[in-house]
Amino acid sequence: MTKYTPMMQQYLRIKAEVPDAFLFFRLGDFYEMFFDDALKASKELEITLTARGGNKEDKIPMCGVPYHSAAAYIEKLVDRGYKVALCEQTEDPKHAKGVVKREIVQMITPGTAVDAVNEKENHFLGSAVKLAGGRYSIAYLDLSTGESKASVVDSEELLLQEVSLIRAKELILTASVDEELIRKFKDRGITAISKVNSETLSFDESLLSLLEGSDVKQGISLLLHYTADTQKRSLDHLQKTEQYEVSSYLQIDPNSKRNLELTENNRSGSKKGSLVWLLDETVTAMGSRQLKSWIERPLINQIQINERLGLVESLKHYFFERESLRELLQNVYDLERLAGRVAFGSISPRDLVQLKKSLQQVPFIKEKLNEIPDKGLMKRSDSMDACADVAELLDASIDDQAPITIKDGNFIKDGYSEELDQYKDASRNGKKWIAELEQKERSLTGIKSLKIGYNRIFGYYIEVTKANLSSLNDDRYERRQTLANAERYITPELKEKETLILEAEEKSVELEHQIFQVIKEQVKNEIPRIQKLAKDISEIDVLQAFAYISEKRHYVKPVFSEQKTLNIKEGRHPVIEKVMDLNEYVPNSCKMDADRSMLLITGPNMSGKSTYMRQVALISVMAQMGCFVPAEYAELPIFDRIFTRIGAADDLVSGQSTFMVEMLEAKHALEHATENSLILFDEIGRGTSTYDGMSLAQAIIEYVHDSIQAKTLFSTHYHELVELSSKLKRLKNIHVAAAEQDGRVIFLHKVKEGPADKSYGIHVAELAELPASLISRANELLSLFEAEKETGAESRQQMTLFDLPEKPEPAENKVLKEIQKINVLEMTPMEAMNELYRLQKRAGKMLTKS
Ligand code: ADP
Ligand code: MG
């Protein structure tokens, strides 16, 4: 230590507090970084690396960013998962004895950086604490809105599921957590992980008052402790933590969620093409976030679901009221985040105007809701607190044209403070005096171009052009500045007015700041009310969005079946239908009940098997969210969980197209599904060789059929499996029909009862524009195989298929004729494969004989 200057010693002391963060060390107008921080930051931020220190040996690597543009650099680092510690000078250098005092004033971390967050998404900081018996206490918190939730989950798997679900930007764990678990989090894309010692907890305990039991408090305690420790600023907007049970929502594991494209599409991972993209007809940012959380956690309680559906129905029916409601909501800003900024003290006068305008909409929103004769909506209207007192306060005090910064004042309305008005009067009058003085001086001197100006250095001055100087013969004029063309003067009278004006201006700016502080404090006291209002409005916004989309896309209200029957009439895949064009999509029905719990779906590639399965799942998810569904009629069971497994070949996203992954996921479904679950197995077994895959597929079907009895849709290209329906009584065959026209396949996308009868493999290859010669060769081979099949293997003579003799023996001639008769179109690719296999074996035998 001693070999460093006192300032570097100070640096090293502070840096030791935050070994895992970049320390932005304030030096004058720069934030400097040293040592490893400098080496790393210069690369990450592409800034010049320099060095500090006299002689060569102890040159310290250094780099820095100007403090006024630091925000962009910090954002870049935090975006990449790093943390930044801001270290400021905490005393005036003028009064410092020795090294200026410095302290870390804030930590900016991926989960707590809330200044530049996407307004349509929550920005969660998560935590997990291991409990006895393999359970975990988990929690998450959005610092920008102040909301937080906590739960206890029974397994590591559920922990991972919840953490991926909320897409935590950063995760806080206890110091004792094992590395294996950390690796699993990292595999799920969570890179910012901090370990915190949980022994020194300090935070506002009252936030936990809604939680029951000590277990559930652990995760959130860790989180609140970390937040208080890193933020070092007011957190008055944090709301009481809500407790929830994973099992009180429809559970969809992260893989299945991705397969169903609920919040992002499968190809690029962006929002476009996902269910949220389709449904997001919300008007406010709060509504958009609320929608996402409803999509991620559909309900399983029928009363709650029906409550939402009832409200949607009324909103759908009352078109004009809904349209006005949407217009009113347009003028509501993000109340939750405004409340956050009030707490942080970073709220600007303009923000407060936005808050006021938003609050002023609320009485009209309430009125609109009341106009719709629906008890539920009226109840919601009644319980909505418009925070009229806050709106009045802001309306009386803050000017509508208020600026973003408070620096120059001038945003408090006239009439709000008598004292302020007096100062403002003085400064306004002052400007009038100056104008009058200018007139007076012009007539005294006879110089028409004489003018009075102002600049920061000289204050007010009288400016006379050089040509007119001769007319200025009075020693009242004291020269201050000479320009190329003019001279500038002051007079005692001018200076006297100036003092009055400037004093008044200064005082009024100062007073405005004080008044602003008081207003902010007053608003701060009302944060919980504003947050409650935000919640109420965001829900109304989502409900109106559901109503809007339901009307626009002709959705129907689903009903729930006591008998757990699923009966969808003319259902559609909501997203594909939208992308396609309403008229092109072929609707399909689906019926499942206790005697018909499994459907085996066959049909050519590209016929629509996967789409059909997803359609059934999406309709269920939408219904349980409380939204209408794309169908003519829908009677549904309430599912507890949904599982989807897509065959390896279709699984483009994960890049892990290994058979092992497929089997692990199948296992996940088989382990957790109940008779109230929905399982989609899409071409499972495709990732391995034919017989293997087929055997596994059959075994899985039998297992689900006999032991789980979950509602299951199972698509397959193993045509052989259609025979299973004679053995398994709850399994039925359905198929997606295709038709043939002029030797080409036409996809009808129509789902029908029974197994598919034809395979269109070669036609699909033709559609894919494989070389014409190859297609005709495949047709030729297929004809051979088909003929063989018809003749029967036993009666056939041995022959060489691929190397026909020039003068065939009569017996072989006969066989060839029979081959010609093969009805290729009756064969599945599987049958063709088997034929080929058999023929090849015979050819081998013939070769060994000859
Ligand atoms: P499969 O799983 O049988 O290979 P997909 O479900 O992937 O087939 O569907 C292939 C394509 O067919 C889809 O991309 C979609 O464009 C179209 N499609 C599927 N179902 C329908 C339908 N019901 N109506 C119209 N087009 C459909
Ligand atoms: Mg498919």
Image (cartoon, grey):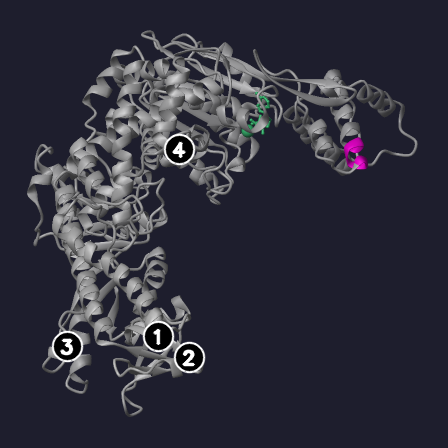
- Name the image quarter holding residue 87: bottom left
Q: Earlier in the sequence, mark 1 or mark 4?
A: 4
Alpha-carbon span between mark 1 and mark 4:
84 Å
On the image, numbered disc 3 is attached to which residue?
100
Q: Which residues are magenta?
A: 772-777
685 or 673: which is nearer to us? Answer: 673
Residue ID at (35%, 28%): 328
Q: Amino acid at mark 4?
A: Lys
On the image, numbered disc 1 is attached to which residue?
445
Mark 2: C-beta under 8 Å from nearest atom of ligand 1: no
* CB-based contact (under 8 Å), mark 2 and mark 1: yes
Where residue 271 sits: x, y (%)? 45, 38
Q: Earlier in the sequence, mark 4 or mark 2?
A: 4
Q: Amino acid at mark 3?
A: Val
User: Of discs 1 and 4, which sits in the foreground?
Assistant: 1
Alpha-carbon span between mark 4 and mark 3:
54 Å
On the image, numbered disc 2 is attached to which residue?
468
Secondary structure of the residue carrying tag 3 is loop
Residue ID at (8%, 34%): 213
